[in-house]
Amino acid sequence: MADPGDRPTLRENFPFWMVHGVALVGAIYVGWSWAALGWLVGTYAVRMFAITAGYHRYFAHRTFKTGRAFQFVLALLAMSSAQQGVLWWAAHHRNHHKYSDQPGDVHSPRLRGFWWSHCFWLLRGNNKHTDLEKIRDFAKYPELRWLDRHDLAIAVAFGFLIYFVGGSTALFWGHFVSIVVAWHITFCINSLAHVWGSRRYETTDDSRNNALLAVLTFGEGWHNNHHHYQRSARQGFFWWEIDVTFYVLKVLEKLRIVSDVEGVPRHVRDAVAAPSRVRLAISG
């Protein structure tokens, strides 16, 4: 369980809860409509793809290649989700894989409890530093360092842009509500995907495959697959495991926007744990 001294202070977590409040009040103020649904679904889809393909599969794991211009676009779009800077995100994720569910993993539900792993770790000021040593391969690009330093300004700028394009409905549903929904669905990979689901592979952590999370996160819910083999841009190892991000990456590869989209070697995919050790469980 998390040490009570680790709980975020009011000053540290006020902006986080303020965004939730603005999303709720704003959504009620402008009301529900088909336009609201369109803005919510559209901006969520763009953000989730940029997070999964950009922050995660490209910047954290380098599972495909692309040019400097498109990597900037991926970083910029992902930063519209207000999940901090591109270098910060990737560096923390690399650290997570190095110590997954072991001492040193800053958001392990096994070690520090569900809510700490879900979002409280993110709110602590001492976790907001970008460790450039862990992300030296991308920290060499000055434009990415600039984006990383101005993460809040980028998210605010997207809010203004969306408002000028679509007005109040776009601002509240396409920016604030979309951000909050993307936050918590993304956070579920750190929390629920280490607690709820099935384990095909015997990894050293508690990572689990969860089909519902896979649909909501465009493929990230195949988390046990991913922890078994991190080099793959494909996290749904089998045809029935839906992985929207991988499908889009393959289209972008056909268009020559990205290249070398890594798949899953058959011997890696078929290295399944004995049936008696595959389980579906909820643990604390």
Image (tube, rainbow, N blue to C red):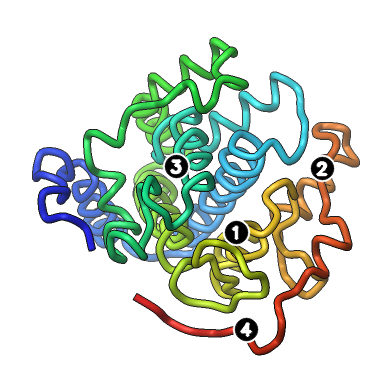
Instruction: Please give the label number shown on residue 206.
Output: none
Identity, as a three-letter code, of the amino acid under mark 3:
Ser
Q: Quadrant of the C terminus?
A: bottom left
**Mark 4 and mark 3: span between their CA atoms?**
38 Å
**Mark 3 and mark 2: span between their CA atoms?**
24 Å
Q: Earlier in the sequence, mark 3 or mark 1?
A: 3
Image depth: mark 1 or mark 4 in front: 4
Residue on which disc 4 sits: 277
Label 2: how many residues lie within 10 Å, few (<14), some (14-19) or many (20+)?
many
Q: In front here: 2 or 77?
A: 2
Label 3: how many residues lie within 10 Å, few (<14), some (14-19) or many (20+)?
many
Q: Quadrant of the N terminus?
A: bottom left
**Mark 2 and mark 1: span between their CA atoms?**
16 Å
Residue drawn at the location 54% of the way across and 10% of the way down: 142
Q: Earlier in the sequence, mark 1 or mark 4?
A: 1
Residue on which disc 2 sits: 261
Instruction: Please give the label number shown on residue 220.
Output: 1
- In the image, is 48 to the left or to the right of 112? right
Secondary structure of the residue carrying tag 1 is loop
Identity, as a three-letter code, of the amino acid under mark 2:
Val
Identity, as a three-letter code, of the amino acid under mark 1:
Glu
Q: Earlier in the sequence, mark 4 or mark 3?
A: 3
Q: Are marks 3 and 1 in contact (CB under 8 Å)?
A: no
**Mark 2 and mark 4: span between their CA atoms?**
31 Å
Label 4: how many residues lie within 10 Å, few (<14), some (14-19) or many (20+)?
few
Secondary structure of the residue carrying tag 2 is loop
Q: Position of residue 150 (x, y in %)?
A: 38, 21
Image depth: mark 3 or mark 1 in front: 1
